[in-house]
Amino acid sequence: MEQENVKSFDFAAIMRRGDMDVLKIARGNPQMTAEEYLILLSRFVAGAPAAEDAINKIAEFGYDENDLKTLADIKILLMCIGHSAILQDLNALLTDAGKSNKRLASILAQNFFDVFRGVYRRALASVNGSLEDFWEQFKEETEESEKENKEEIDGSPKTLMEALRLVIKNEARRKRRVLSVDDSMVMIKTVTSALGGEYTVQGLTDSMKIEQFLFRFMPDLFLLDVIMPGLGGFELIPIIRRFPEHKETPIIILTGNGSAECLATAVSLGVSDFMVKPIKPKVLREKIAKHTAKRPRQILL
């Protein structure tokens, strides 16, 4: 049998997003190893492009039995990796396509394509190396953890649940993540300097790339400039809120426009706070600490 291209995935990102219930899989399969789960995720990522092609063919009335089999196989993988949210729609698509109800199947496929692509892109964005990279990182994190507890590493295969427990422990200790979206690199550097080493700060100067960026980086708080080329801060808010994991993530507006109208717009869009430039580092730190303190840091088992 040909060697599978098994990838490493960022379990913490998957768990924070919440669209794959990896904890449910771990609880229901206590003997499953982390490697076995990574194999399933890798198979999904490898098979998703063919599934997208099959969905397109159904939308265009040009599918056959092989396309239905491709989608049936991807459905099993979705179940195995704990992604149940889209199964009802996929089942409906398979049922109507299987009954040759092509018109209804085409409509369902058109609606389902973007949903499935979002699932695929999230999974793909969680890839962070090879299987060897996963075990190397797991070993380092285990050694650090067991040094603290003065336990010895037994070298035995780690179950998925053991891997998740370590991820959860590390999540509880990690720095909060802040994304500063501003067309001025000077402003991003100012924010980074103001926050010191207390937070992990990422800067984005091209606001048009926000969606692509959020598939790779999951902030605990957003700092948005209002006026930027492309998309302004107020236009970014609905895009951010479309991500399920960011329905309630705090958003602070940083702007040179302190008018009552600008403030009213910010309030109407549900932002968490508002600051007029030039920023005062102490005030910015206080506001970020206040809003991130309300968000749970730890993923619960």
Image (cartoon, helix red, strand yellow):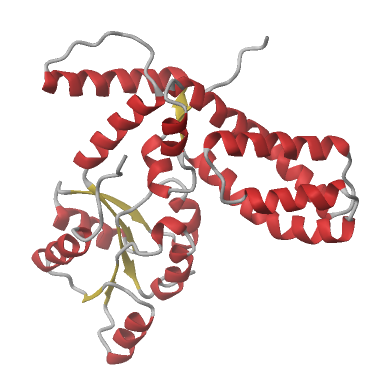
- Taking the spot 38% from the left edge, 18% from the top edge, the residue there is 135
- Residue 91 lies, with reference to residue 164, above or below; the image says below
Q: Quadrant of residue 174?
A: top left
> In the drawing, does residue 114 fall left or right of residue 169?
right
Residue 7 visible? The answer is no
Q: Is residue 245 visible?
A: yes
Residue 5, percent from left and from top: 58, 20
* Residue at the image point whose x is 42% and y is 72% from the top: 232
- For this orientation, the residue located farthest to the front is 28
Q: Is residue 65 left or right of residue 162?
A: right
User: Residue 65: horizontal and vertical position, in percent?
Assistant: 87, 37
Work out whether residue 116 or residue 226 is closer to the camera in this orientation and state it: 116
Image height of 292 relative to 11, above or below: below
Q: Residue at image x 38%, y 47%?
A: 16
Q: Among all residues in the image, which is located at the extreme bottom?
A: 260
- Residue at 74 percent across and 40 percent down: it is 71
Image quarter in which the C terminus is found: top left
Q: Nearer the viewer, residue 263 or 27?
A: 27
